[in-house]
Image (cartoon, grey):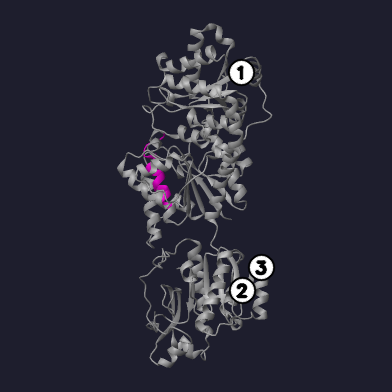
Amino acid sequence: MKKILVTGLFTLHWGRLQYGNVGNYYIIEPLFRCLHKRFPNYEILTTFQMDDEFTKKEIVTVLPMDLYYAWNENDLKNAMEDAENAEKKQTGKTYKETHWISVLNDVDIVIDVAGDMWGDNAEHVGKDRFFVDCLKMKAAQLLHKKTFLFAVTPGPFTDERTKKLAQDVFENFTGVFIRERISFHNLTQWGFSADNVKFYPCPSFLFERDLKYTSKWMDAIYERKTESGIAGITFGGFNLPYGPYDMWPREKEQYHNFVCLAEYLIENLGVSLCLFSHTNGFERQPEFVRINGRDFQILNQFYEILIEKHPSWESKIILINEPLLPKQIKSVISQLDMVVTGRVHASVAAISSCVPTVFVEYDQNVIYSDKMLGFASVSGMQEYVCEPGNLEMMIERVAKCYKNKEQIKKHLEMEIPKIQQKAEDAFDDIKEQCALPKYAFYISGNSGRLKLFLEQASESVTSQIQFIFSEYKIPHELKQLITSKSIKMITYLYDDIESPEKKDKNRELSDILMKHLIAFEVDYCFSFGAHLLSGEILLNYKNRLINFHPSILPMFPGIKSIDQAVKAGNAFLIGNTAHFIDAGMDTGQILMQSVIPIQAFTDSNQNYDCVLDIQVEMLNQLIMVINNNMLDNRTGKIENANYQNYTIFPQIEKNKPEGD
């Protein structure tokens, strides 16, 4: 069974993704569900430490966390060992199969889920964490795995040692999917190539709320909603003027701007407030219990400051003082008239529920991040972004949002379905980029080699063959075999082409073949045909047309090459060559050759099959090489191949001395 490994900087201790950061869970649940939808026959493995209920429901297999990162002094050493041994394996040297390499050997696709931690921000979570991630992905890339940097807001990058490795790894990802367009500009500023970068909205836009959720909080919101309207407020340590983000305790003065904003909402706009935390916590011992997270203590202190200053406001402010599940929190948010949030995924929960939203950026003195502006821009809401240190801006944005709330709702009702579809498209893109190459065959005559190949080919390989193009009538037995493999046959009889000149006939045949290659979106065409291909096909399919020629090129090009070798009288070895087709006759870049002493041919009573049948083994090897992305189309070199060994013909067995 094929496998997908979901890993990366979201790897945290047990329960942290599921019962801690609510926003990260908004990403993870749709991620696994969308992967299953596009890859129904794949097993999904993950280093994310989810509980048994989640793994059963979402059908994922959890691997040990320390495969990726364990928060100990050996993390960097182990990651460097992984990358070093992956390089040794890639270059054909003796290597140690580390636990990480063992997992990589068993998977087909690796998805690195990073969020805003792919860069310096990872250091807030663990020592050398970003460097470790780069080394882990480097190992996967060296082993030719399809690797995707997913749902990422990259940067910043201030450590030059890490940045150099990061740039190399970044360029070699199969795809990089950023969550907001502002990252294109930032990546260029930081010296990263954006050639493999695409924008797709965060999968958190696909997270669904609990439509059946009811509670005292929902009742209280509904009551105030009908009386005066109600605005939600949530923020955390990243939005306050002093760091670190987890500082505790905090001075009352740090809340000044948020207190003034709350006063404006209640006194000037006449709305009630709902304070809710977008992070949770939990205790595992002696029994598992969910508890309020780090943001709650900040919001609780904020609430106490407001009530101390305005005792009569107890009826105007709801403080949700219990940890709600992500689906429940989104249900709460969806019922609010407006939201002011310093938590980016609380903004996603709000706007994806078509709730007018004001986006409070992180305080740049605490941590660098452009993601709040980036996420707001995704939905065309960038005019409602404010800086937490600028009270005038905060009030202006809130006033504007409240005034335009009906227009904003209509705008979001139009835009959110488009954003959600675009978020879904990311998974279609992964599927498309991970699809195995599509092949076609151009044949002539009896095509004995194709017949032999199809008789032993696996169902997986034959499913990659889009069609077989023949310039002659296909023999009945071969036709039956092709039909049994559910492969399409296309016949374009060479002898029926009316052009008098052979070169014109070749050109017409080439044009017809090219037309079908393009129509079927074929990646490579293998040629066992008798005529020279010419014209536009050589440009459109440069280094993607592979011919099999029965000689050791450049010796004996052209037709009847085995006969040429015999006639020459001095040929000791004969064989086969697989090469790219160019405008010459058997002059394209050589990819692979096989050799056999000419004596074997003469001893077989000049049975051509003893030479030609070796082409089938070469074809099998080339398909394996191309399927695993090991062929460099520019040079014709095969990665991981040994170009150093030699063989002496004739091979002589030494007689063993008597008595041994």
Percent of width and height locating residue 565 = 43, 88
Sequence order check, earlier mark of 1 and 3: 1
Dot 3: what SS? loop
For marks 3 and 2, give the one nearer the viewer: 3
148 within the magenta span: no
Bounds of the magenta span? Answer: 125-139
Location of the C terminus by quadrant is: bottom left
The CA span between labels 1 and 2 is: 73 Å
Residue with the mark numbered 2: 455
| Structural crowding at the residue carrying mark 2, measured as other residues with C-alpha within 10 Å and reported as few (<14), some (14–19) or many (≥20) | few
Say which element carries label 2: helix
The residue tagged 1 is 229
Q: Is 633 situated above or below 509?
A: above
Task: State left or right for residue 302 relative to residue 649.
Answer: right
**Relative height, residue 214 to residue 632 (above, below):** above
Query: SS of the residue at dot 1?
Result: loop
N-terminal of the two: label 1 or label 2? Answer: 1
Where is mark 3, residue-wise?
486
Kindly check if marks 1 and 3 are in contact, taking CB atoms under 8 A apart as contact.
no
Give the crowd class for mark 1: few <14, some 14-19, many >=20 residues within 10 Å.
some
Give the side of residue 531 with respect to residue 458, left or right.
left
Label for residue 510?
none
Q: Is residue 357 above or below residue 632?
A: above
* Nearer the camera: disc 1 or disc 3: 1
